[in-house]
Image (cartoon, coloured by chain):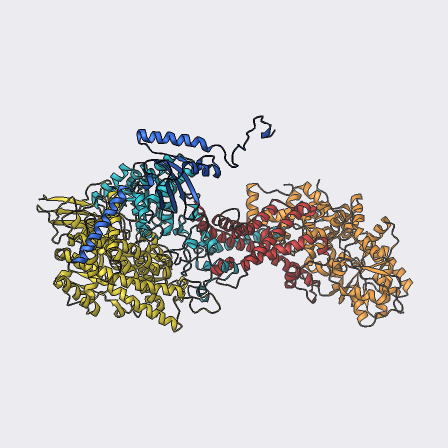
Amino acid sequence: MNELQLLTWARGPGLDIAVGIFVLGVLWRLIEIYTLGRKKDLAAPRRAAGASGLHTVFRRSLAPPGMLKRSPVSYIGGYTFHIGLAIIVFLGAPHILLISNLTGLSWPALPAQLIDLVAVVTMAAMLVMLFDRITKPAKRFLSTFEDWFTWTVTFLPVLTGWLAVQHLLLPYTTMLALHILSAEILLIVLPFTKLFHAFTLFGSRWYNGSANARKGVPV
Amino acid sequence: MATAQRIVVDPITRIEGHLRIEAETDADGRITQAYSAGTMVRGIEIILRGRDPRDAWAFAQRICGVCTLVHGIASVRSVEDALHRAIPGYSIPVNAELIRNLMIAAQYVHDHVMHFYHLHALDWVDVVSALKADPKATSTLAQSLSGYPRSSPGYFADVQKKVKTFVEQGQLGVFANAYWGHPAYKLPPEANLMALAHYLDALAWQRDVVKLHAIFGGKNPHPNFVVGGVPSAISVHTRGGGQATTALNMVGLQTVQNVITRMREFVDQVYVPDTLAIAGFYKDWAGRGEGLGNFLSFGDLPAKGFWDTDSYLIPRGVILGRDLSTIHPINLDADSEIQEFVSHSWYKYSQGDEHGLHPFKGETELNYTGPKPPYQHLDVEQKYSWMKSPRWQGRSMEVGPLARVLMLYASGNEQAKELVGMTLKTLDLPVDALFSTLGRTAARTLESKILADAMQGWFDQLMANIKAGDVRTFNDQHWDPSTWPTHMQGVGLMEAPRGGLSHWIVVDDGKISNYQAVVPSTWNAGPRDKLGQPGAYEAALQDNHVMHDPKQPIEILRTIHSFDPCIACAVHVTDPDGEELVQVRIK
Amino acid sequence: MSASLNKVTQTLKEVIDAPIASYFESCVHCGLCAEACLFYTETGDPKYTPIHKVEPLRRVYEQEYTLLGRLMKMVGLSKPITDDELEQWQELVYDSCTMCGRCSLVCPVGNDIVYMIRKFREGMAVSGHVPDGIRSATRRTVEIGGPMGLKWPAVANVLKHAEENTGLTIPVDKEGADYLVLLSSMEIVNYPEYIEALAKVFHKAGISFTLASDAFEATNAGIQIGASDIARVIVSRIVDAAERLKVKYVLSPECGHAYMAIRWEGPNLIGRPYGFKVVHVLELLDQLRQEGLLKMKDTFKDPLILHDPCQIVRRGGVLQAPDALIRQVAENYIPIADQQKWNWCCGGGGGASAIHTEEAEALRARAFGVKKRQIEAAGVGTVVTFCANCRITMEEALDHYEMNTKLIGLTELLAEHLED
Amino acid sequence: MTLDVIPIHVANQPPGEPGLSGNAPPLLREVAEQVRRLLESGEPSAIDLSALPLTSADLDWLQEKLGAGEIAVTLQAGGESTLDETACPGVWWVTHRNEQGAVTSQFIEVAFVPELVKAHPEDVAIGLETLAFMISDHQGDAD
Amino acid sequence: MQGPLIDTLARQGVSRRTFLKYCATLASMMALPPAAGRAMAEAMAAARRPSVIWLPFQECTGCTESFTRSHSPTLEGMIFDMISLDYQETLMAAAGHQAEEARHTAMRDNAGKYLLIVDGSIPLGVDGAYSCIGGRSNVDLLQEAAAGAAAVIAVGTCAAYGGIPKANPNPTGAVSVSDIVKDKPIVNIPGCPPIPVVMTGVLAHYLTFGSLPELDDKGRPKAFFGETIHDRCYRRPFYDQGKFAKTFDDEGARRGWCLFELGCKGPVTYNACATVKWNGGTSWPVESGHGCLGCSEPDFWDAGGFYKALSVPADPLGFTAAAAMVGAGAGVAGGFANRAKKSTAKKTHEPVTLDDLEVPK
């Protein structure tokens, strides 16, 4: 198996399997979770402005008052690397091409140099978050193997992608193959680890928001 | 005198691919039976199966690197034909057609010149005798034939000296161990020296004129194509800079013009005069080398679209029994017309080997029954070649320059009639002389002249289109396979330098489900069919060939080389399935 | 698996639903909920991280309600729930969690952790690992009538005093009254003034009200301990009385979890919506204020801050009323940073105040630190609040820190300055 | 520890005009030896001057000593070269220069005729061919 | 003093005396005795042109054609001055067993010193019967020729890595030269075909310096295969700015924008097309509007479609639909199991009593 065969496997069957397991996992877990259902709240609801499940889905992305001061690293680091990942994946030219090939949707891309810069910032933010998870008592206490594993699985695609475009460390063919493989591993593990919050956070925020909204409290 | 015996010539050199000729001669050396066998196969058709039809041209083109674009063009045409049959009105832009015509014609002229000088000439030109030539006399001979500037005594003396020192050093290289001094060489030393000088000039000339392919197709050999047109976008009219960034800018177009001019000069001043001069000394070869009498041409170089056969420069049709008065039409889809037989070929048809299959229903499964190498002789009663035997209405056919020139001549093309008339008059030979090795070789030259002249016309049209603002070179309407019907099939036809070429493609769900290529050298070099009818090579060798010395098979070489064989085309298009039994039934 | 453990798992299997599943799948272990929980911020001990408090619940969910979890269990790879683990968790789920709900408002992925604590307590209750204080309060509430073992005669006696002080009659078991007034034992015993204030206001507003001799107790230790069946028994008394007396409204007193129990958990406990409305006393007063029936003759001069009891404001939804009322009566009201739905808990809610072990009390004192800082930062001598439990807890803490801050109930304050 | 600690000192400034290294005079003896060998066995030889430690002053001294003979050959081949016979016949002073005129090498060649001056039979044969060619050309014009 | 070199120099206008003077000066500079100058001249003049044998196996003769297109050095220049091309089926005059004889004499005379050039892959199927010359299988011929070769130059991706005959499903069992010849230095010059001047350049390097050029891990000369096309492409700035041609004839294509989206494999291909260009530097595939096929990489025929960009799946996704079904199925199954478990838990619910609150004994 030489580099090109590895790359072709990654771009072919590898991607097929990864997307397959991803779709399978997402549907399976989503249905499994949300078919548990919840009992209807019989208490008389109270109306309040700006209080609804949907509001919470968006509002909860913002830092509640005072919290930003209490743990700026979590918030700023979190915003940076999430937004960074989104920019790289959805505004990087090669990725848009992949998306348009899979879904047919396409839109203009950002220049490659800008994406490189965003990648560096994203990696820096993730490293800060990692350091924070190691040093902050509450975070360290909570952390299980899954946290370190999911951090690595999310960090590798960005690192290998950046190294590939910069033609560093390994020849481009190999590094691109590693980049695609690491992204595929991310897709495969996502539905079965805490990365699934990418999907369930909407449900969670909505439940939280609507429960409190019934009591008239916009959270 | 030679006794009746069995001659084997393997490998046949100065051709493309691996050909083996076995011949039986009678007591006085006349060839009574001849067998031609292709001895190398790659199975590109199996490799093509299941792939994206838009990639097919790149694979098919690697069938042959000598006629290096014909299979590429036939392949893209087969996909375009399939799309045209499925989606009426589908066609490629005019500029793309003109560019393809220019590339095809350039391939013809380049290929024919290289064949004449580098592959065929050494059968007629005795290099050693050239060393005894008088440069001055050679110069007068050359200047009497044409105005070609490189004809001074000093020029010929220098060439002679270069070859003389080369020979005297004892390392003969490519000229080693040949048949110099064989009585069959009839040229005077001066003619040999002139031909030898032109052999070297042709090498330098060909290197320069392939730039046309480099500009339109990115490189030569194996220029690039794309289904739906040509990839070389014309950057002449872009606004806001960037005019000079693709090959087809003003510089590129001027280079193409220079190439066309250089091609026409070389053909007019060197190739045609040399052919006539050498032919003049070998008139006896007008009496042998054409046994079949049947000729087939698919026609090519369209003016108004691939599907408007009337606008073809070279007409499509069949000539039977050397009768130039009637041209029979070809029905491509009729099962009874074009068929491939495998009775003497190393294949196995699921329904038995005795009847032929139309290419759309073509399926080939390798069935090597030959001896385990190394072998001395093939059992010619059984199967003995990797090549199939294509037949038209059950008859063996010859394809190639002779077929095309006869078709042009018979269909009344003015330039063809004038050129053929001039040739026969200079050589003082009757029309029947065309049906021979000499006729075939002369036809190749005349054909080059016709095409070289036609190039200027296409180039002027292209420039006119660009001037009028139409720079379209590619139709991306149905580029995406999702817009294709689930099942479609098409045939891509073209006249390759070595003869009529046809690629038959069947596409299911956007993937190739069957791909057959019936190529010129299979028509010509194919073995016997079930009726025992010999192929064109075999019939040609059996037509009045007397071997002076079986050890030195120069007579065989002359006739075989006159077909300009391309065995890589012929053979690897048969697709041995090897062990796995993959049967594709066309529903 | 011992019988009780089996029952725990059974109970938890009943209560785990889609929200809990979604919350556990969303938690990214970011630790921000800890930053919002006073038990962590004041002690710095990571074990008080809210999401960690429901770890056993998570494991039950994983082992019972996910295919992979079940598979792991079958294969023996999963960690079962053990009795000593539950025993160890008692401190985390009761002593160090007042169910104030602040963590639920902060979690970036939207996990409603207090909802999970409430469900987990269902299992904890059944396991028996509950603090004695709450267990005995619950037993007393069920068997006697109230967490402090008050019976109706004692209550009637207090009412008599109140009638004497205010000169107003406090009707009992009067059918057809508008409001059925409920009282919490804390008020009856420690802050009888609340009853007098109430009578004055009702009289002033001309609203008919009554008490019910068989349903005077508002508190519901059942929901604090987390046993819904027991909570149903307790809340049904109020519902039956209210429906027997055909009242239009039931008035929930200045007590946090009481409002929570009767207003929000009640209908779900008994399994049907009420025939009557439940109103918190401040909602009523605010309504009267808006109708101009609550005029103040003078204002309270000293600077003060307002402590918004979690169960009423953040988790109860009574947001605007307290603010409007305090501005009406306090001249020098100083709003502080984390207030209303962002309020920091007094440290005693959710039954915690009833736990009188040494560690629990020390912990509560530590937890009070945040409130202490708020008071000192505002530089006030008076704190107004409207939950008896908060007042008890804060009084204990103020004594502990020897702070001479004055604590006043909001209704009581209003009553004092009410126009005659 | 440096070189000058070594007790032996070479007095590098010999008596006589400045710049002479004293190496030139012994060369005359060697040239004489080579001439004797040429006379006895006819075997030519050469001394590579640029390979010897001679200063330009030595070379001038040597050239002046050997004097000039009757023949001075200049060769145009990849720059100019001069092969001059010295006062004693058989001893030639050969100087090679490149296209830019810089001296690339100098030899004293002891031979009846320096190697380079001789014409090689091969070249003579080619010369013969061109001659024959000229003749036939001349013939052609004549008839 | 006569020999090929002198004739060569004579043809280039360098006279015998100039050559001798050059040798004398060279010897002097190398501090060799004058006699050494003459000896050197003798040796250099008489050098025999090294013998070269070109064996064609499963090939399309594209590499031979490409060889004839080289402009510096030219083919005729090489044949007359640099090498003695003793066996080349496309150019040699002899045929049949005379051709075989020519090869065997050359191999005998220059045993251990001749250079073996191979184009085309070697089939192993059916004991090599898929490709024979003179009745002998290619494997047999290769082993025989390689035995006496000083070095083997595998020309073209077929000889270097197996090429198109080895493309999936490799019906003839084709392998590359390095799969068979293990004991000889091999130089791979991949490409389909390789650039003309790259082939002659590597040959000239070996002949003039007598040593193999520095090779990379795939046996390719780093001089020509050290960098990727992408790194040297003149359209690279457009790649960086995100300016891509969407079709072969849109405004972007005419402006010469990057062809990444049309499947160009430049980034993963090591070759010199972008610098040396083709046919006398006239143009090269990308400059003429078509993406690079990646033809100098092993197994490029099976690297996903030529028109599929590197970031696009090599073949359409097959599992997604089925996976979705299975996923939904598992989800629903999980859901039913959960709801069943929950309802049984509810049904078997025993009301909690005060005693349950007591600490278990």
Instruction: Choose between B347 and C270: the one closer to the eye.
Output: B347
Tell me if B390 is positioned left or right of A188 in this view.
left
Q: Find chain E in the image and tell me its colour.
A: cyan
Q: Find chain C in the image and tell me its colour.
A: orange
Instruction: Choose between E4 and A74: the one closer to the eye.
Output: E4
Q: Find chain A in the image and tell me its colour.
A: red
- Name above or below for residue D53 compared with residue A7: above
Instruction: Choose between E337 and B123: the one closer to the eye.
Output: B123
Instruction: Choose between E38 and E114: the one closer to the eye.
Output: E38
Q: Position of residue A140 (x, y in %)?
A: 67, 45
Tell me if C114 is positioned left or right of B582 in this view.
right
Q: Find chain D in the image and tell me its colour.
A: blue
Quarter of the image holding residue B219?
A: bottom left
Q: Position of residue B553 (x, y in %)?
A: 17, 47
Q: Position of residue B17 (x, y in %)?
A: 26, 50
Q: Position of residue B93 (x, y in %)?
A: 36, 68
Task: For the C terminus of chain A, give its image quadrant.
Answer: bottom right
Residue B353 in sight in this render: no
**Residue lying at 36% horizontally and 70% vertically, measured from the top left:** B463
Tell me if E91 is positioned left or right of E305 in this view.
left
* Number of marks in picture: 0
Residue B295 in sight in this render: yes
**Residue lying at 35% horizontally and 50% vertically, measured from the top left:** E73
- Name above or below for residue B226 compared with residue B122: below
Task: For the N terminus of chain A, give its image quadrant.
Answer: top left
Q: Which chain is yellow?
A: B
